[in-house]
């Protein structure tokens, strides 16, 4: 995908605050600290448009980035962080489930998992949510630069098994450090947003 423009558009904590209009959207979901914001920055060739951090739970808002003046990439707040009060977790659930279940512009979700670890119960729940609402999804195993190729292959099989992916369900390997997998992710997103 040729990126001609990428701009932060707005943040939302509820559906009413999401952008008006009918541009299609693709959201990034995954555990806190898994690398959602890094993937977004890598996709649009920018170092810091989406804020990244070593502190899990940094992105607590739904952040919208307008790409090529024609579609949005949506950075969802991460789940699964331990040090957050139950009240905040409940708010998170309400916000994200509301967005996933009601946002008409949503065309697909890129769900990130960490290639170094087996998917968690939270990852499974998110994936099952996507299935439940009939939202097209691609699972992306990120931080591929942190382990060897052989190990990646083994771990991809674990991801496929743990998340009960069918053979036709897409599972891609990615690294924000090397850019590995970027073109394949864009191919999927491009089809979803018809670019
Ligand atoms: P929240 O906003 O808290 O939900 O986190 P996030 O999912 O947006 O993660 P973020 O992109 O902020 O990345 C978390 C940490 O992982 C940062 O220190 C990144 O530099 C690092 N990171 C992300 N992707 C990669 C990757 O592909 N390889 C390596 N080596 N580090 C990565
Ligand atoms: Mg983030």
Image: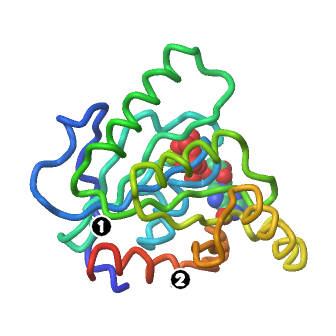
Residues tagged 1 and 2 counted as in contact (Cβ below 8 A):
no
Going by the image, does 145 lie left or right of 25?
Answer: right
Mark carried by residue 66: none
Q: CA distance from mark 1 to mark 2?
A: 19 Å
Residue at which label 1 appears: 6
Which quadrant is the N terminus positioned in?
A: bottom left
**Of residues 95 and 134, the one drawn nearer to the viewer in this rendering:** 134
The number of numbered discs placed on residues in the rendered structure image is: 2
Q: Report the residue at 53% width, 54% height from top.
A: 36
| Residue 28 x, y percent position in the rendering | 46, 55
Colour convention: rainbow
| Residue 95 x, y percent position in the rendering | 37, 32
Task: Tell me if mark 2 has few (under 14), some (14-19) or many (20+) residues whose alpha carbon lies within 10 angstroms of its own.
Answer: few
Splitting the image into 4 quarters, where does residue 69 fall? bottom left
| Residue 174 x, y percent position in the rendering | 64, 72
Going by the image, does 118 lie left or right of 112?
Answer: right
From the Cβ of disc 2, is ligand 1 less than 8 Å away?
no
Mark carried by residue 184: 2
Element marked by disc 1: strand
Splitting the image into 4 quarters, where does residue 158 fall? bottom right
Splitting the image into 4 quarters, where does residue 70 fall? bottom left
Element marked by disc 2: helix
Which quadrant is the C terminus positioned in?
A: bottom left
Question: In the rendered view, would you say 89 is above or below 182?
Answer: above
Q: Which one is in front in this view, the residue at disc 1 or the one at disc 2? A: 2
First in residue order: circle 1 vs circle 2:
1
Question: In the rendered view, would you say 42 is above or below 91?
Answer: below
């Amino acid at each position: 995908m040729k990126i001609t423009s990428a701009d932060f558009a707005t943040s939302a904590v509820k559906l009413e605050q999401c952008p008006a209009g009918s541009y299609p959207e693709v959201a990034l979901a995954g555990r806190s600290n898994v690398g959602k914001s890094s993937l977004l920055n890598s996709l649009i060739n920018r170092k810091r448009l989406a804020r990244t951090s070593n502190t899990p739970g940094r992105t607590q808002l739904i952040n919208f980035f307008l790409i090529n003046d024609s579609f949005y990439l949506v950075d969802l707040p991460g789940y699964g962080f331990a040090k957050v009060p139950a009240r905040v977790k409940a708010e998170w659930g309400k916000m994200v489930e509301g967005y996933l279940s009601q946002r008409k512009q949503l065309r697909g979700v890129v769900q990130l998992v960490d290639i170094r670890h087996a998917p968690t119960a939270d990852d499974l729940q998110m994936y099952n949510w996507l299935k439940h609402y009939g939202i097209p999804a691609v699972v992306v195993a990120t931080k591929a630069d942190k382990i060897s190729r052989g190990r990646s292959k083994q771990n991809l099989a674990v991801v496929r098994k743990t998340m009960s992916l069918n053979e036709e369900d897409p599972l891609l390997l990615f690294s924000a450090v090397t850019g590995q997998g970027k073109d394949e992710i864009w191919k999927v997103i491009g089809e979803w947003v018809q670019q």
